[in-house]
Each structure stands twice: as C-alpha cells, then as structure tokens.
Image: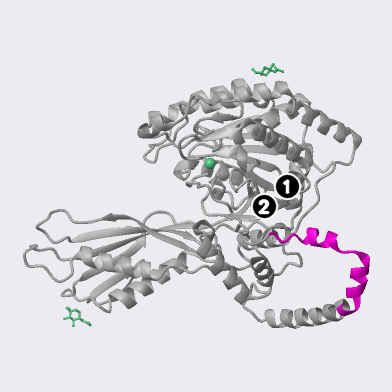
Amino acid sequence: MAFKSHNYTLLPQGESEPLTASRQRTKWNWKRILHFTIPGILVLVLVLFLSISQAIKGSKDPQVFPHPDTTACPQFPAIESLSDDRKKLETEVRDKIGSDDFFNESLKRMQGAVQIPTESFDDMGKVGEDPRWDVFIEFHDYLKKTFPLVYSKLEFTPINTYGILLEWKGKDESLKPYLFMAHQDVVPVLKVTESRWKYPPYSAHYDGRYIWGRGATDCKNNLIGVLEAFEILLEKDFTPGRSILAGFGFDEEISGPQGAQFIAKHLEDTRGKDSIELIVDEGGLGIQVVDGATFALPGLGEKGYFDVRITVETSGGHSSVPPDHTGIGILSQVISAVEAEPYEPELTPANPYFTTLQCSAEYAPDMDSWLRKTIKKSLKSKKAAKSVADYIAKKNVFQRYLMQTSQATDLISGGVKINALPEKVYAVINHRIAVESHVDDIRSKLRTLVESKILKKFSMSLDAWGDVSGNTSSSAVGQIILEDFDMPLEPSPVSPFDTDAYKTFTGTIKQVMGEDIIVAPSLMTGNTDTKFYWGLTPNIYRFSPMREEGRANAHTVDERVGMKEHIEAVKFYAQLILNGDGS
Ligand SMILES: *[C@@H]1O[C@H](CO)[C@@H](O)[C@H](O)[C@H]1NC(C)=O
Ligand SMILES: *[C@@H]1O[C@H](CO)[C@@H](O)[C@H](O)[C@H]1NC(C)=O
Ligand SMILES: [Zn+2]
C-alpha cells in the first residue's frame, strides 16, 4: 500500500459499559415477555408511526438521505459448494494448504521473495535506462523457478518489461475473469534505519511466528499467496470456469508511472472496458476485532489525491528598503488563511465509512450506546450523521480523515539571498479528497479563499488555473498563481455491495475465515495500483486477507508477517478461485 500506515483502528472503540443485546435477551423469561407484550405493541405502533413520518420527512433531505438500502450493513452467507466432486476437491486443497509440508515450503517461498530487495525509488528513471530496475530480473527468475506449473501452464505476458500478467484460461469464455493484483516492489530501506531492525531487513529471518523483512506484509505476501494458490490448483489439475488473471506491477510504492497502468491499459486494449468481474488487490485493514466483534474490512473506495502549488511573484529589490510584506510574508498569509478554514468532517451514505459505522452499530456488542443509537439514526437523519462525524473526528484523527478532505502544506520554497527581496516563492498543499467531493471543489475553495482573504488586502492579481482576477495593472504588488503541482486523482468510484461479485467475495471470506466474521465495507485514505483499473470493473476490493495480528510495520522498521495468517490467506485465494465458477 502506498501510504504510511499507523497502528490505527478503523472503528471507534467503545468506552462505556458493554451493552450486549444478546446478553440482555438471555436474562428474559417468558413471563416477563408476556408482561411486556401489550404495552410493547402500543410502543411498536408508535415507533412505526414515528419512523414512517420520519422517513417521509427524511426523504426531503438532499440526495443521499435517507440511506437507500433497506439493510444498512448487508451480510451474505458463507459459500457452500453444491457438488460432491467440488467438495472433495475443496477438502483436498484445504488439507494440502493446511499441511506441515506446505507450511515449510511456503515459508521458504516467502523468505526467498523477501530476500530479493525489489526497492523502487522516487527518482527512478525509465525501465531499461535506470540500472536500479535490474533487481527485478532476479525476482522474475525466482518466481519462474518457484512456481513451475504457473509459468508452464499459464500465459505469461511481460508488460513494460517487469510488469507481470498471467492469464489462466477458463472453460467458459462468456464469464468475465477474476483479477488478482499485488505489486512486486517494496519501499526502500533507508541506510540510517538499517541498524534499528531487529533482524536485517532482507534476511527474511523467521522467528517461529513471523517472517521479518521489507515487503513481508506489503506485499510480497499477497503476491506469493496468489501464486501459491494458483500452483496448488494446477497441481490438482483444476481448470477454472472463468478465466483467472494475475497482474503484478512493479512501482506501486512510487505511484505507478511505469507498472500497473500499462497492465491496465493492456487489459483494456485486449479485453475492452468493463471486461473484468472483480479485482482483489492488497489493502484495507484486513480482519480486526473491534468492540467485541470480528470484522473483515475490504476497502471499497479510496479518497482522491490533489497537490496544489501556490506561487507568489513580487518585484525584487534591496532588502534595506522593503515593502511591509515580502513575497514570503504574503505566501505565509495565504497558508494561514488556508489553515484557518480547514475542511469539516461530514458523513454521508456515499462514503463506505458510513457503512463501516453502520456495521459496527449493528454487530459490535461493546460499542458505546449513545454512539450506536446516533449511528443508526444517521441512516435517516443528516443531523445525526453530523453529530456522529463530529464526535468521531474529535476522538481520532485517522477516523476524522475518513470523513473529510485533508489539507497539508508539505513543501515550501523561496528566497535566494539574505539581502534581496524574494521575487518568486511557492508552497505546495497536499489534499486527500473526501469521496463525496471532487478535484474541482478544492480548486474553487482555494480560489475563493485567495480572492476574499488576500486580494482584499494586497493589490495583486490572481491566476487560478488560467482564470485571472484581481488587480492586473503593472503597478500592482504582484501576482499569485494557483496550479496543479502534479497529476490530480479524483476519489475512486465506490464499489457496490449488492452485486454477485460482492456476494461471492464476502461469502468466501466467511467460508474460509469464519462465519462469525462481519464483512464491513471500508474506505482507504491512500491509493493502491487499482487507481488505474477503474475502467475494467466496478467491483474492486482492496483486501489483504489477513488477521491484524499477522501484519506489522508496513513501510517502517521491523516489517513482518505471521506465517499462520499467510497460510490462511492462501486458503482464501484458492477458495475464491474455486468459487468463481459457481460449482
Ligand atoms: C517443517 O520444518 C520444521 C522445522 O524445520 C521441522 O521440524 C519439521 O519436521 C518440518 N515438517 C515437515 C513435514 O517437513
Ligand atoms: C491596482 O494597484 C495599483 C497599485 O497599488 C493601484 O494604484 C490601482 O488603483 C489598483 N487598481 C485597482 C483597479 O484596484
Ligand atoms: Zn503495498
């Protein structure tokens, strides 16, 4: 995943006494229930009346309220195969993956993969020109040696040299393929941090529980896990009903200028738009226990990304006779004005995090009772949704940014000489755009802000993405320019959670990882390589099929992955492939 992960949790933790609905219910006896029946019916009628009138009122709220679904947190059953043959094959595959033999081999496969330092650097040159890419040759050789059936029976297409596309032809061409994604590259280990690792970062040391090393959990585990699932099914002579694809980019950690986007383009060129049934990529928060329930949290959407450069140009001159405000001073005022008006948390049903919360209100027994009530209310009431958003935002900064656009001034540059007035200074603001918003909303907010707060004070002109306003006379103080710093990215489309693809995907999670698991759609604040694949399918699931305790420290020292959890992930991938043809 291409963003720094912290030790966060996606759901608000309960803080009051546990309020377990089922625990209360077990205390009831039939006498008490009868005793409450008559007043109960009266209350029921009243509640019904109130909720109908509320629903009518609610439907006047703008667009998204009331929540369109009848079920706030839809759950679909664990998949069960229909035929005896299939059941037999499933058992064989599961037993094989669960064997000691497999565990030992899988450990070796994972270690070998982690030991190859496939680092991608921000300043990487083109493939074929920058020798730092050469390590991927070794990685490809390793994969070919380690997965002989995959490479002999599947069609392998190298894309832009190091991109990997594997196509496993299914029996039925009319079914759209499943696509499994991962990236081959890892975040570089900084020399200065190397000594802080408990075990050297490319030693792939196994301590009996975890494999330690860069890439162990982001995301050679996904890549190796997918190929292990392929290899086992090939060993069993399995032919999938629908085609199964794997697409592995090699520069995800530097935003993917040369890798996955060419794989996506190749797929669109050869198969056409909307030609894939579903995509599973790394990401999301895996499987976590929160407030007394176990949640699988696939990312069904991603926030957008937008960097804006603000440049202030003023006339130079000698520093001994300065104006009251230099270019640096004016730029500072722009940044202050931006920070004085941050975006606000808002929660709407368009946001997958809204659904995460509905799921926790529905299924997490230990959630704070006020919060549970208010989250449920927010299905119909915008006001309740706002209370929830404000409450959660105050408690936890990570959760806050699941509900709003973030803005952070991360770069500043200006001034060349201590006795000369700065003629050109600039700052860059990084935004992660809320799912309900757009790149253009950010542009217009900044433009309005500069016009109302800065142009009022200084006779300057403003060039906001080519639109010029303010004082353009040559005697004016100067000019402010607002422009894109690099390629903006709109928030992703949100994957629907009522499709057959979603039912199969979530049904497989429950089948492999436990029927008690609640699958809760979630939102990602960072972006994976899936950003290039929006045209191929609406059903994109960013989900590393791993329990929380099996993953640690992606992007930092002591990154590691639990072997037990890795084995479970292989089972998940294999079962999803089996479930793909509906037998
Ligand atoms: C797996 O590896 C462990 C540790 O090296 C060893 O004790 C065990 O016998 C191996 N199991 C198999 C089935 O090879
Ligand atoms: C533009 O700025 C100059 C210099 O400060 C000033 O003399 C002029 O009146 C301004 N023009 C307008 C239209 O505000
Ligand atoms: Zn990753």
Residue indicated by mark 2: 539
Seen in the image, is 492 located left or right of residue 71?
left
* Residue drawn at 11 percent across, 67 percent down: 322
Q: Position of residue 53 (x, y in %)?
A: 75, 83
Q: Secondary structure at mark 1?
A: helix
Residue 175 in view (yes/no): no
Residue 37 inside the magenta-drawn segment: yes
Q: Earlier in the sequence, mark 1 or mark 2?
A: 1
Q: Is residue 309 above or below residue 471?
A: above
What type is the residue that disc 2 sits on?
A: Asn
Asked if the residues shown at circle 1 and circle 2 are in contact, with their CB atoms under 8 angstroms apart, the answer is: yes
Task: Examine the image and state in which quarter residue 62 appears.
Answer: bottom right
Seen in the image, is 579 located left or right of residue 220?
right
Q: Position of residue 12 (x, y in %)?
A: 60, 58
Query: Label 2 crowding class (10 Å Cα cut-off): few <14, some 14-19, many 20+?
Result: many
* Residue drawn at 73 percent across, 45 percent down: 509
Q: Position of residue 14 (x, y in %)?
A: 63, 59
* Quadrant in the picture for the C terminus: top right
Q: Secondary structure at mark 2?
A: loop
Residue 563 inside the magenta-drawn segment: no
Q: Position of residue 230 (x, y in %)?
A: 70, 31
Q: Is residue 254 above or below residue 73?
A: above
Q: Is residue 451 above or below residue 420?
A: below
* Quarter of the displayed picture in which ligand 1 can be seen: top right
Magenta-drawn segment:
18-39
Q: How many marks?
A: 2
Q: Nearer the viewer, residue 290 or 351?
A: 290
Residue 320 in view (yes/no): yes
Q: Nearer the viewer, residue 464 or 511?
A: 511
Residue indicated by mark 1: 505
Q: Main secondary structure of the magenta part?
A: helix
